Amino acid sequence: MRVLSGIQPTGRFHWGNYFGAIRQYIDLQDEEASLYFLANLHALTTIRDRDLLRELTLDAAIDLIALGLDPDRAVLFAQSDVPEVSELCWLLMTITPMGLLERCVSYKDKKDRGVSADTGLFTYPVLMSADIILYDSDIVPVGGDQVQHIEVCRDIAGKFNHLFGETFVLPKAKVLDDSAKVPGTDGEKMSKSYNNTIELFEPTKSMRKKIMRIQTDSRPMEEPKEPEGDHLYQLYYLFATPAEREEMAALYRRGGFGYGEVKKALADVADRFLEEPRAKREELAAHPKKISEILGDGAAQARSKAQEVLKRAQENCGIKGW
Ligand code: ADP
Ligand code: TRP
């Protein structure tokens, strides 16, 4: 089985990205042949600042490795380092019905949020389809918001196979468990768009400041409270050990404490969890050449598969092989 997923380098990773997606990608690297890439061609549909895009792409690579993605076990590369994907994207576009893309919710959402409706945004799912089938991927772990795009991918790949003969593997989505959406500092879902994030690699001082500013209700100290459904407890839960979770839950039920104490405990468990990744990140950031090497190796491995699949597609549709 081949697992593949991509993540857009459109901002620094926050707690929601880690617990909702990244952690689960990293867990999969031990199970199957896995490829992960930084979707910088997709990010170009929203970021038009050269230096920022470069920086975010490199930061994303460093963050992923610091968090445990192991380039010896998984292939990590930048999307733009595999030019075959753009060629395959064109082949797919020639058979993609407009209506299929017009139905995509994420296009409609972004347009409604004011992202300019360029053709790159509209054809985003076609490039995503090319990303996936270019490596004969079987399984694509994604958040629930991306499942529709995997369906689009299966439609397009299936149509190509139907028209030109068996060419592509049809992938399956593995929907990540984001049922427990990580709440942000205002209690709503943590998201870049809501300005309520805590970045994973924030320095401890600013992380603690944000934690102290997490909004809570104004319940009197002595009043007992159910921990479930309380967003401060939900955040604590992510970082705490099972014993610590139980202890904190008991404290909630007993009452007689202030939220300040919970916030302090949250900051402590978050700092504890981040100690190793922060050290690893610092070390990696001090050796940018190493990161270029890792991305270069990853791209070379990815390309060798990509070239094989692209050739198959080109031959089957009649643009190569005379
Ligand atoms: P944002 O909402 O901050 O723009 P993205 O849409 O870039 O985040 O999310 C990237 C990945 O992280 C997706 O797979 C998404 O499901 C996951 N994710 C983002 N925010 C959360 C959250 N608050 N809780 C759980 N998963 C999340
Ligand atoms: N669209 C995905 C997201 O925003 C990122 C992505 C691009 C992707 N290409 C992909 C994910 C291929 C899985 C497979 O989260």
Image (tube, helix red, strand yellow):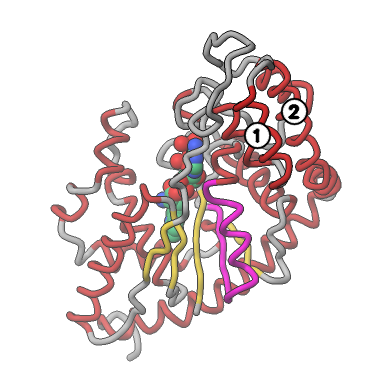
Q: Residue at x 36, y 47 (%)?
A: 145
Task: Please give left or right for residue 131 compared with residue 242 in the image.
Answer: left
- The mark nearer the N terminus, 1 or 2, is 1
User: Residue at 70% of width from left, 16% of height from top?
Assistant: 260
Q: Which mark is residue 265?
A: 2
Q: Quadrant of residue 150?
A: bottom left
Question: Which residues lie in the magenta part?
Answer: 20-38
- Is residue 178 within the magenta segment? no
Q: How many marks?
A: 2
Residue at 29 percent across and 51 percent down: it is 123
Q: Position of residue 225 (x, y in %)?
A: 55, 23
Q: Is residue 29 magenta?
A: yes
Between the C-alphas of marks 1 and 2, the distance is: 8 Å
The residue carrying mark 1 is: 236
Instruction: Between residue 34 and residue 179, name the one nearer to us.
Output: 179
User: Residue 43, can we see it?
Assistant: no
Residue at the image point whose x is 63% and y is 15% from the top? 213
Q: Are marks 1 and 2 in contact (CB under 8 Å)?
A: yes
Extreme-front residue of the structure: 254
Residue 34 versus residue 141 in the image, above or below: below
Kindly indicate the quadrant of the structure image that contains residue 92. bottom left
Q: Amino acid at mark 2?
A: Ala
